[in-house]
Image (spheres, rainbow, N blue to C red):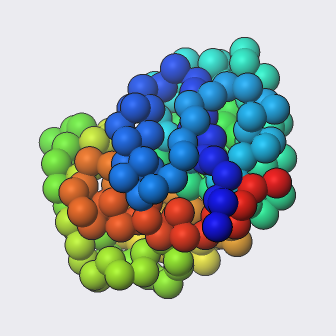
């Protein structure tokens, strides 16, 4: 079955090519783009990122990408956020002054003092609820993290995974067609690729 293509959102936040390679390994056609028309026509979206809160949000707004992202999520098509691509979904961040996308109520907070920051390396994810992207991924699997901030959603029902690093923090969220993770599946070996394979399995041929 033709599954169309996945739009990887290009907003100068880095890590795009490694996400594209992971999707290609999952037999998905993946297009790195900032074109609203290509975004609208995609079967799925990956919102990746490595970088700073304020500069990334300014790039999104300068490229007129905020509304296309919101419209895509509202369409019900599969959406996957990765690392900064999770954090920017919230209302705001301790890292800067720019307002977030406001798609998930809550705030991004700095990891507590006492733990080495950034949190870099392998750590376990305790899954709190089932979701298609997590099928075949064992409980307490180690994934690769690189971050200094974490998402703190207001609604506990969206928290799908937690990780312990100084505190227990939210490392995955789900809501309807949206899933987003703080860790990097594309840097987490075969178990990370399983998440991309599961994501690919939700694609239905595009618009």
Image position of 206 (left or right of 127): right
Which image quadrant for residue 3? bottom right
Q: Nearer the viewer, residue 46 or 201?
A: 201
Image position of 107 (left or right of 177): left
Residue that sits furthest to the top in the current view: 62
Which image quadrant for residue 119? top left
| Residue at screen point 65% across, 19% down | 58
Considering the image in quadrants, where does the N terminus appear? bottom right
Q: Residue 84, image x and y in percent?
A: 47, 40
For the image, the number of numbered tags is 0
Task: Establish if 117 lies above or below 57.
Answer: below
Q: Residue 67, image x and y in percent?
A: 82, 36
Query: Can the viewer see residue 53?
Result: yes
Considering the image in quadrants, where does the C terminus appear? bottom right
Q: Nearer the viewer, residue 26 or 1?
A: 1
| Residue at screen point 78% across, 49% down | 72
| Residue at screen point 83% across, 47% down | 71
Which image quadrant for residue 156? bottom right
Q: Residue 9, image x and y in percent?
A: 60, 34
Task: Establish if 176 lies above or below 77.
Answer: below
Task: Establish if 81 lies above or below 98.
Answer: below
Residue that sits furthest to the front in the current view: 1
Query: Can the viewer see residue 47?
Result: no
Image position of 30 (left or right of 69): left
Image position of 176 (left or right of 110): right
Q: Residue 114, image x and y in percent?
A: 17, 47
């Amino acid at each position: 079955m033709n599954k169309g293509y996945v739009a990887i959102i290009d907003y100068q936040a880095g890590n795009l090519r490694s996400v594209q390679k992971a999707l290609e390994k999952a037999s998905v056609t993946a297009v790195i783009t900032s074109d609203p028309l290509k975004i609208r026509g995609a079967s799925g979206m990956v919102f990746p990122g490595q970088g700073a809160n304020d500069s990334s949000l300014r790039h999104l707004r300068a490229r007129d990408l905020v509304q296309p992202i919101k419209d895509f999520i509202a369409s019900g098509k599969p959406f996957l956020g990765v690392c900064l691509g999770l954090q920017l979904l919230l209302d705001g961040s301790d890292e800067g002054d720019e307002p977030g996308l406001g798609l998930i109520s809550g705030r991004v907070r700095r990891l507590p003092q006492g733990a080495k920051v950034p949190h870099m390396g392998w750590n376990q994810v305790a899954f709190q609820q089932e979701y298609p992207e997590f099928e075949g991924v064992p409980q307490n699997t180690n994934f690769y993290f690189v971050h200094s901030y974490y998402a703190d959603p207001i609604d506990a029902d969206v928290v799908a995974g937690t990780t312990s690093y100084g505190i227990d923090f939210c490392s995955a969220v789900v809501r309807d067609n949206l899933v987003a993770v703080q860790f990097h599946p594309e840097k987490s070996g075969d178990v990370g690729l399983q998440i991309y394979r599961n994501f690919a399995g939700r694609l239905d041929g595009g618009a």
